[in-house]
Amino acid sequence: MTTTPPTMRTALAAALAEAVDADPALITLGADGQALFQGVMARHPRRYVDVGIAEANLVGVAAGLARSGLRPVAAAMAPFLVRRAYEQLRLDVCVPALPVVLLGVGGGLGYGPLGPTHHATDDITLMSALPHMSVHCPADAADAVSILRSVLSSGGPAYVRLSARQDPPLPAAASDGDPGTPRLLRDGDDVLLLATGRCVAEALAAADALAADGVDAAVASVTTLHPFPGDAVRALARRRALVVTAAESLGPGGLGDRTALTLGRDGPPLVRLETDHRYPPVASHEDLLHFYGVDSRGIRSAVLGRFTRNTRKA
Amino acid sequence: MLHPDELARRARQRVVELAARKAVHLGAALSMTDLLAVLYTRGLRYRPDRPDWPDRDLLVLSKGHGAYGLYAVLAELGVIEADLATLPGHPSDSVPGVEAATGALGHGLSLGCGMALGARLAGRDQRVVVVTGDGELDEGSNWEAAQFAAHHRLGNLVAVVDRNRLQQEGDTENVNALEPLADKWRAFGWRVAEADGHDTAAVTDALAGLRSGDGPAVLIAHTVKGKGVPFAEGDPAWHMGSLDAEQLRTALAALGAPAVPALAAARGDRP
């Protein structure tokens, strides 16, 4: 009998209930999406506020609650939280650096065949442009719980991109230790695969395939994108002939951008795999990752296209 | 405590003197001056000597472009000591007495909802007053907040609409009609009162009448944009502007202000 690992939503529902138990200043808000708050609603019904389908008001109310001394955790579907409430996020929460935690469910391409209205490959870019905002993209449920605990104790505005559905299983190391620094999930001498969120599983699968190709690939996951753990990424890239980043995000402000800035011209060659503005086909999350070239096949191809035995000798 | 009429007169004088030094949203600052004067002397539980008193009522100026009108009142009360010309053109957290940074329209009511709900959850007997413009009510986020406040029966939330009937490009009813405005608030579940927004006794009574009751309340205060400065009253051209020396002299005379020896200096400050 196999056990299905928890989704980010079920894992966070339990973690949020525990956090509300422990901190009387914590209050949770949703926008007609209650899955994350089932535990809070059961144990502390007054500490969950549903604003209905009204993301701008969700963020404004959260800011008002923060100004009254509470510590709000507000969640909505990522595309609507980020795009519809962007001015409230910027002016009401981030400029005054209020302690509001924002959970975006279904960031990236997680809603698959629901189409571009529901895709949020721009969430990391937009949230990274906000003052004082920390931006996080966990790779599985345990990682999401780890980052939630971290941002709840940090005090400033934070955005956590959550997946919409079941995540592929990852090794326990993907959620061990400080979520603010990259985790090395697989060592390898030749190339470094640096991935975030759902693409971590893709990078691990790519590394397996590359081993059969004779390429020894290291895989590291990056959960916290802002502030970017530049020193740790620089250390991981050292002595490797190629770095490939993979993220289901647009380029600006994302993993590739930050890695490029960190490594500079003196670092190893960098291939950035990320999404673009092509109109997506009607397809599953996995097929969309392939369409934009950020799946395991895309990562493997990028490595094989750049990495040869000559590269290794150099 | 000053009578609100005298507080408003002095605050208006500060606003027009400032407008001789820099461009300000003159019309919007002057239409709400009497409302703020009543609120800070009679409507809010507020101690000017302790602007951070934890038990104070909170005022959010959603129509943030009226900032200098708010600053002028707070300066008369001694809360703000800085030269108003050095303060930001929209309420910011750095300014004493400012409860929430505003300026992009349609944000204040949601902030006020959160503050009112937070006070209730904390068991604090605290009221939150949100002063909105009327043109600002074009922004849909206000109505998200209005629905939310009624749903949560936020009886400690009061909106005051500065109904001066002018937005930047003219009559609100010509740009994007708001009427029947009182009916809209009622339909959203709010208690509604209306008053002449320049009659401080009437505003005081209307606010007192809204104090007790179930759910949020709104005062629609009928005002004149640019009130107190005859050539600016009701003229959308004075949405934002600065005064030349002659205009300043006329404005001060209309406000019953003593002649200002700094007039020449004020003129000299202008670029």
Image: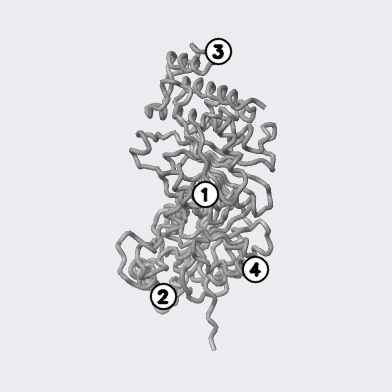
Residue A223 pos. (x, y %): 52, 63
Near mark 2 (Cα within 10 A), the count class, few <14, some 14-19 or many ≥20, is many
Q: In the picture, which quadrant includes the N terminus of chain A?
A: bottom right
Mark 1 → mark 3, Cα distance in angstroms: 43 Å
Residue A225: % across, % down: 50, 57
Q: Which mark is residue B141?
A: none
Q: Are marks 4 and 1 on the same chain?
A: no
Amino acid on which the number 2 mark rests in the picture? Leu
Comparing labels 4 and 3, the label whose residue is closer to the camera: 3
Instruction: Looking at the image, tell me whether mark 1 or mark 3 is earlier in sequence order.
Output: 1
Residue B258 is marked as 3
Label at residue A210? 2
Q: CA distance from mark 4 to mark 1?
A: 31 Å
Frontmost of labels 4 and 2 is 4
Looking at the picture, does residue B239 appear above or below residue B142?
above
Q: Position of residue A76 (x, y in %)?
A: 49, 61
Q: Residues within 10 Å of mark 3 (few under 14, many from 20)?
A: few
In the image, B236: left or right of A152?
left
- Chain to which mark 4 belongs: A
Q: Residue flagged by tag 1: what amino acid is it?
A: Trp
Which label is found at residue B190? Answer: 1
Query: Which one is in front in this view, the residue at disc 1 or the one at disc 3?
Result: 1
Q: Quadrant of the C terminus of chain A?
A: bottom left
* Chain identity of mark 2: A
Q: Secondary structure at mark 4?
A: helix
Query: Is residue A267 something one can see in this rendering?
Result: no
The amino acid sitting under disc 3 is Pro
Alpha-carbon span between mark 4 and mark 3: 64 Å
Disc 4 target residue:
A43
Q: Position of residue B142 (x, y in %)?
A: 46, 48
* Residue under the point 45% across and 49% down: B141
Do the residues bearing badges 4 and 2 touch, measured as CB atoms within 8 Å? no
